């Protein structure tokens, strides 16, 4: 999909957003008054204790262990996404995420359930560890051109639905191709010891798909879980240090059926914007999620099903597990 097509689609989506409000079961809008603010957590600081030489573990081995963790495949979860500006809630979405994985690939569906005016918007994200490009994204907008569009890698770092999370941010595995990694030290987040890994895009493709120049990932040392990320741009004009663009922090997490999952996480932007993701419900190891759901040509029919209130069979009558 070229830049002009994507731009027109985004304009169309934002026009819809400006005229849509998420509704509660009572019919009242769930969007807060612009003057109503909430107390948001500050992104937890991660002081780095440097390690060098033989004391530093191999970065690629750490990433490989993280990528091989139990994803609870096949599984699903429903999340509430809240967009905030200076602490004021401006937009709320409900997203159903369904995925399956094996050693070499992950396939994830993102189905927008609310607000109703955008219900049926969906996309399929594929992570392919042995192919190039390593990630593919196909998008369907039911109110758009009524066809499935392939998102160009140069747009992988665009905000989803105006949020601070991008396609790159919601992938389940850290990419192995096109990045240089190194372990820079240890730190602590959420009272858990973490490894601090720095990443830099090293190929033309990954440099095109990233708006950041470097990133610092905080991987749990005692279990395979990502607790935070810092994204940096170029050097600031007044200091010889990289500009901090945004920060992801997991605020709460738990283990369900052997699968570590975030309950609440934030993406904090440098312009007083933030996005909160809150887990509403989830189920892991669902045996009867049909593989055919993850075909590109199924996106239009899935959009129609979601607008009609469709739920995967395994979800009906089941709570969190």
Image (tube, rainbow, N blue to C red):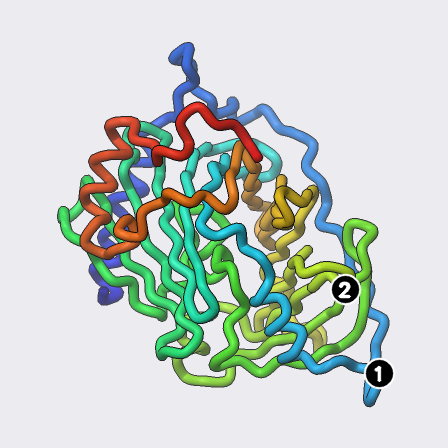
**Does residue 15 appear to the left or right of 101 in the view shown?**
left
Front position in the image: 298 or 26 = 298
Q: Please give the count of numbered marks on the rendered protein.
A: 2
Classed neighbour count for the residue bearing mark 1: other residues with Cα under 10 Å, few (<14), some (14–19), many (≥20): few
Disc sitting over residue 272 in the figure = none
Residue 80: x percent and y percent?
50, 35
Is there CB contact under 8 Å for labels 2 and 1? no
Classed neighbour count for the residue bearing mark 2: other residues with Cα under 10 Å, few (<14), some (14–19), many (≥20): some
- Identity of the residue furthest to the bottom in this view: 53
**Does residue 251 appear to the left or right of 126 in the view shown?**
right
Residue 304: x percent and y percent?
20, 36
Locate the N terminus by quadrant: bottom left
The quadrant in which residue 38 appears is top right
Tell me which residue sits at (61%, 35%) in the image.
Answer: 87
Front position in the image: 5 or 200 = 200
Please give the residue where the numbered disc 1 appears in the rendered image.
55
The quadrant in which residue 132 appears is bottom left
- Which one is earlier in the sequence, the residue at label 2 or at label 1? 1
- Identity of the residue furthest to the front in this view: 287
Mark 2–mark 1 distance (CA, rounded to whole Å): 14 Å
Tell me which residue sits at (36%, 30%) in the image.
Answer: 115
Tell me which residue sits at (42%, 38%) in the image.
Answer: 95
Please give the residue where the numbered disc 2 appears in the rendered image.
221
Q: Work out whether 134 lies above or below 146.
A: below
**Does residue 162 appear to the left or right of 10 in the view shown?**
right
Residue 312: x percent and y percent?
35, 36
Locate the C terminus by quadrant: top right
């Amino acid at each position: 999909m070229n830049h002009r097509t994507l731009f027109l689609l985004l304009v169309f989506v934002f026009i819809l957003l400006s005229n849509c409000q998420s509704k509660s079961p009572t019919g009242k809008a769930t969007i807060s008054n612009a003057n109503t603010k909430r107390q948001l957590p500050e992104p937890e600081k991660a002081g780095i204790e440097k390690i060098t030489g033989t004391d530093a573990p191999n970065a690629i081995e750490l990433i490989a262990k993280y990528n091989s963790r139990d994803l609870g495949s096949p599984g699903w979860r429903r999340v509430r996404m809240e967009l905030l500006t200076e602490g004021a809630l401006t937009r709320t979405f409900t997203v159903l995420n369904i995925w399956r994985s094996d050693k070499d690939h992950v396939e994830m569906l993102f189905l927008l359930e609310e607000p109703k005016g955008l219900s049926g918007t969906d996309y399929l994200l594929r992570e392919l560890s042995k192919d190039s490009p390593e990630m593919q994204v196909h998008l369907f907008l039911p109110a758009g051109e009524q066809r499935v569009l392939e998102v160009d890698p140069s747009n992988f770092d665009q905000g989803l639905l105006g949020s601070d999370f991008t396609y790159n941010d919601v992938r389940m595995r850290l990419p192995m191709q096109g990045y240089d990694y190194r372990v820079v030290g240890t730190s602590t987040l959420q009272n858990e010891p973490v490894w601090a890994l720095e990443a830099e895009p090293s190929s033309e493709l990954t440099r095109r798909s990233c708006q950041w120049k470097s990133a610092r990932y905080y991987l749990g040392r005692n279990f395979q879980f990502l607790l935070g990320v810092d994204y940096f741009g170029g050097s600031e004009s007044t200091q010889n240090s990289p500009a901090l663009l945004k920060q992801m922090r997991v605020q709460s997490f738990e283990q369900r059926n052997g699968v570590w999952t975030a309950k609440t996480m934030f993406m904090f932007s440098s312009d007083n914007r933030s996005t909160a993701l809150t887990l509403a419900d989830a189920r892991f190891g669902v045996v009867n999620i049909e593989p055919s759901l993850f075909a590109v040509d199924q996106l239009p029919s899935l959009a129609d099903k979601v607008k009609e209130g469709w739920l995967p069979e395994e979800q009906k009558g089941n709570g969190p597990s």
